[in-house]
Amino acid sequence: MQDIRNIRLSDGREIPQVGLGLWKVRDEAEFKRSFDAALAAGYTHFDSAQVYGNEQFLGACWKASGLPRENFWLTTKIRTENIALGHTQQSFPHSLERLQTDYVDLLLLHFPVPLQRKKAWQALEKIKAAGGAKSIGVSNYTIKHLEEMKLYATEMPAVNQVELHVFLQQPELVDYCRKHGIVVEAYSPLAHGKDMKNAEVQAMADRHGKSYAQIMLRWCIENGLVLLPKSVTPDRVRENIELYDFELYLEELQALAKLNRNLRTCWDPTRIP
Ligand SMILES: NC(=O)c1ccc[n+]([C@@H]2O[C@H](COP(=O)([O-])OP(=O)(O)OC[C@H]3O[C@@H](n4cnc5c(N)ncnc54)[C@H](OP(=O)(O)O)[C@@H]3O)[C@@H](O)[C@H]2O)c1
């Protein structure tokens, strides 16, 4: 079993640095297999969302584990449609019901929905004040969206979950978040599996006796990010947290920095006004 390090959030809580991504895990048996492999390997952090349609599987799985609720870090996100309709607060109790819990560890706004950001964030602040979420944050926010938050937020987000990997490094955004005490969560840290053939990454994997995926994920660790690799393959689930027994050399980090090519595999929020 692997020990996963924690990262301290601005609200004082400690988030496990690696969490299991759950996007596109829609089949209940597959979900359970992935969850069980993760739990056995040492994961405690699970990243769900209303739009993934699997909060109820996560609720059933953590309950079935027999472990206390405090052993888990559960994240969910308010789906875009609910934000757009002004239903952030009304939609949240349904998430809690599906997750079989009375609080989540982290609640995020899934996307910077135009004209609704202030209202949605104030709803999250209320949910937190009422104890429904221990920490609150945003996802897919650019520097512009975060700057705007200074005008209306009582509390700035503890995290910003964005697409981040060797091929999409977003250094300005990461730097901005670091300076403002916002922890960055790297989603799609394996670039959604879209580039697993880069020769330089493979050479590093061979040098360290690690896999290609582990080099991509270790890059996130070296950059102090929280990372959320997704896999429904038990061996890969295990492999994806075996990250703390090696380090990348300075020259390797410099070579990886040059692989940034703004490869977006999911949303592009930079065009959202
Ligand atoms: N906030 C947002 O808007 C947002 C958007 C996207 C993602 N996310 C979060 O981030 C998580 C991860 O992102 P993602 O699902 O896009 O992709 P990812 O983790 O970058 O990549 C997943 C893909 O890589 C494969 N894979 C996993 N481990 C591997 C390994 N060790 N070796 C080779 N291939 C491996 C998986 O295949 P198998 O599953 O078949 O093993 C899957 O095809 C999501 O699940 C979600 O929780 C959030």
Image: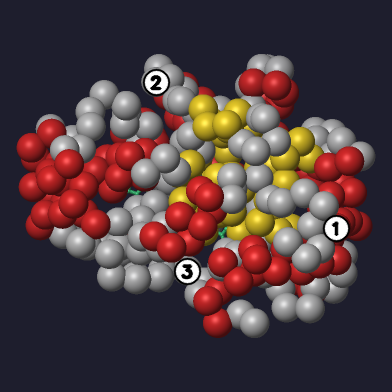
- From the image, which quarter does the N terminus lie in? top left
Q: CA distance from mark 1 to mark 2?
A: 38 Å
- Where is residue 255 shown, x and y percent of the image? 15, 54
Residue 150 % position (x, y): 73, 61
Label 1 sits on a secondary structure element that is helix
Q: Quadrant of residue 8?
A: top right
Which residue sits at x=33%, y=39%? Answer: 222
Residue at the image point whose x is 20% and y is 38% from the top: 248
Residue topped by disc 3 = 266
Residue 137 placed where, x, y %?
68, 51
Amino acid type, mark 1: Gln
Is tag 3's residue or tag 2's residue first in the polypeptide sequence?
A: 2
Which of the two marks, 3 or 1, is nearer to us in this view?
1
User: In percent of the image, x 82 and y 52: which residue is there?
Assistant: 154
The answer as to whether callout 3 falls within 8 Å of ligand 1 is yes
Of helix, strand and loop, which one carries label 2?
loop
Mark 3: secondary structure: loop
Q: In this rendering, does residue 54 appear at all? A: no
* First along the sequence among labels 1 and 2: 2
- Amino acid type for the residue under numbered disc 3: Cys
Query: Considering only vertical position in the picture, is 135 above or below 63?
Result: below
Residue that carries the numbered disc 2 in the rendered image: 2
Residue behind label 1 places its C-beta within 8 angstroms of ligand 1:
no
Q: Amino acid at mark 2?
A: Gln
Q: Which residue is mark 1?
A: 122
102 and 236: which is toward the camera? 102
